[in-house]
């Protein structure tokens, strides 16, 4: 797994590439928590994530809670069908706005 952070104006974009599983979720959590403390607006680009375990879902939910506590907002970008289905089945998506690409996310989060 690889994690990149970009700034687009006041929006932080956390781009995740590869598999998010029990072995990589802690790495994602550390990097992501560093990121959320620097901006109230976060896009999580999951378009290059091929697999996400429950450990990865917990990290995403943790980010949502951290951002909410700091009056921030998280938008998920580019969910693969398999990951979207898992998030829908578990009720996970009710906590997030989901868009197809980064530009749509920036427009939504403003």
Image: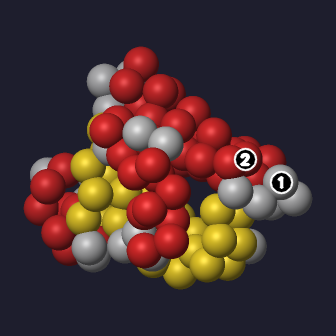
**The N terminus lies in quadrant:** bottom right
**Residue that carries the numbered disc 1 in the rendered image:** 22
Q: Element under label 2?
A: helix
Where is residue 33? Give x, y as percent.
Answer: 61, 40
Instruction: Please tell me whether residue 9 is drawn above or below residue 40 in the rendered image.
Output: below
The percent coordinates of residue 29 (x first, y second) are 69, 46
Q: Secondary structure at mark 1?
A: loop
Q: Hey, which quadrant is residue 78 in on the image? A: bottom left
**Callout 1 crowding tier (Cα within 10 Å): few <14, some 14–19, many ≥20:** few
Residue at which label 2 appears: 55
Tally of numbered tags: 2
Is disc 1 in contact with disc 2, using a CB cutoff of under 8 Å? yes
The quadrant holding residue 20 is: bottom right
Q: Is residue 110 left or right of residue 97?
A: left
Q: Position of residue 79 (x, y in %)?
A: 41, 69
Q: Is residue 42 above or below residue 105?
A: above
Above or below residue 83? Residue 108 is above
At 79% from the left and 48% from the top, the residue drawn is 26
Q: Please name the colour scheme applied to the rendered image.
A: secondary structure
Please indicate, yes or no, whether residue 52 appears anywhere in the rendered image: yes
Going from N to C along the chain, the mark reached first, 1 or 2, is 1
């Amino acid at each position: 797994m690889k994690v990149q952070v970009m700034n687009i104006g006041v929006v932080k974009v956390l781009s995740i590439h590869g598999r998010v599983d029990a072995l990589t979720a802690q790495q994602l959590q550390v990097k992501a928590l560093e990121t959320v403390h620097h901006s109230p607006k976060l896009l999580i680009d999951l378009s290059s994530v091929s697999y996400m375990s429950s450990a990865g879902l917990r990290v995403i939910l943790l980010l949502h809670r951290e951002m909410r506590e700091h009056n921030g907002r998280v938008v998920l970008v580019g969910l693969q069908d398999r990951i979207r289905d898992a998030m829908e089945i578990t009720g996970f998506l009710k906590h997030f706005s989901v868009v197809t690409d980064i530009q749509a996310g920036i427009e939504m989060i403003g």
